[in-house]
Amino acid sequence: QKEVEQDPGPLSVPEGAIVSLNCTYSNSAFQYFMWYRQYSRKGPELLMYTYSSGNKEDGRFTAQVDKSSKYISLFIRDSQPSDSATYLCAMSASYSSASKIIFGSGTRLSIRP
Amino acid sequence: GAVVSQHPSWVICKSGTSVKIECRSLDFQATTMFWYRQFPKQSLMLMATSNEGSKATYEQGVEKDKFLINHASLTLSTLTVTSAHPEDSSFYICSVRDSRLGEQYFGPGTRLTVT
């Protein structure tokens, strides 16, 4: 079993829809959670970073963490064609550079105009 | 957030030659930098952790003599792919982590094509 599981998609939704992206994990030591967006042939861009259970909102993006269920989500409201990209979840046990960050395999998202 | 730059963004080289990729941390001093490799439609694979002033730490299965890493200053790490072969063609991305907050930032990546 992988430490982090993420549905690879592809996920296709119409413009304006609410998108839900999810990851599950098995290591209860993970305390820091990140979501990245990666466009084709570009480096990943950090979208959201959180270290507590609950919701964190930033514009159209909401990150949700449920440590009891070992489940994290990223919601995108009012999705736009420019949101079409691969979304990677990532997590680590510590904020220290010595603590490895484990990435999900990424979900390919396509927003249809 | 941190800004990380990489140079070059794309390089084509002949089989058997060496290629150097530079990674710079522009926003803060990074004692640690990370090098990843990504094949098309696959996730990131950590190759090595670059430590300023000391030897890099390589992940299992990564040849340290083939992928030379030098972290000579707090803002610069280099990855040299020695005696490149077509199977080394990939997308190489460096990353820095803000040790105060834990956020990790990536560079724009370098696309290496070995012919």
Image (cartoon, coloured by chain):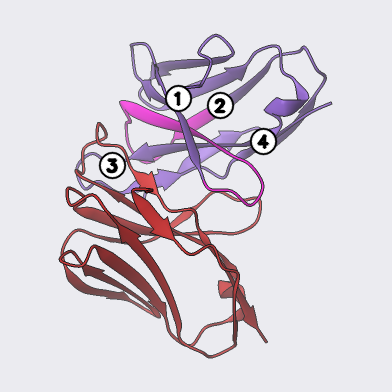
Q: Relative to B91, does residue B66 appear above or below in the rendering?
A: above
The spot of residue A102 in percent (x, y) is 36, 45
The spot of residue B69 in percent (x, y) is 49, 17
Q: Cα distance, mark 4 to mark 2?
A: 16 Å
Q: Which residue is mark 3?
A: B98
Q: Is residue B12 visible?
A: yes
Q: Earlier in the sequence, mark 4 or mark 2?
A: 2
Q: Which residue is mark 4?
A: B90
State yes or no: residue B31 in magenta.
Answer: yes
Label 3 CA crowd tier, 10 Å (few <14, some 14–19, many 20+): many
Near-viewer residue (A23 or B109):
A23
Q: Relative to A66, does residue A45 appear above or below in the rendering?
A: above
Point out which mark residue B76 bears: 1
Q: Amino acid at mark 1?
A: Leu
B48 left or right of B42? left
Q: Cα distance, mark 1 to mark 2?
A: 7 Å
| Quarter placement of the C terminus of chain B | top right
Q: Are marks 1 and 2 in contact (CB under 8 Å)?
A: yes
Q: Which residues are magenta?
A: B23-43
Q: Residue at x 25, y 46 (%)?
A: B102
Q: Cα distance, mark 3 to mark 4?
A: 26 Å
The spot of residue A78 in percent (x, y) is 48, 88
State yes or no: residue A26 in magenta.
Answer: no
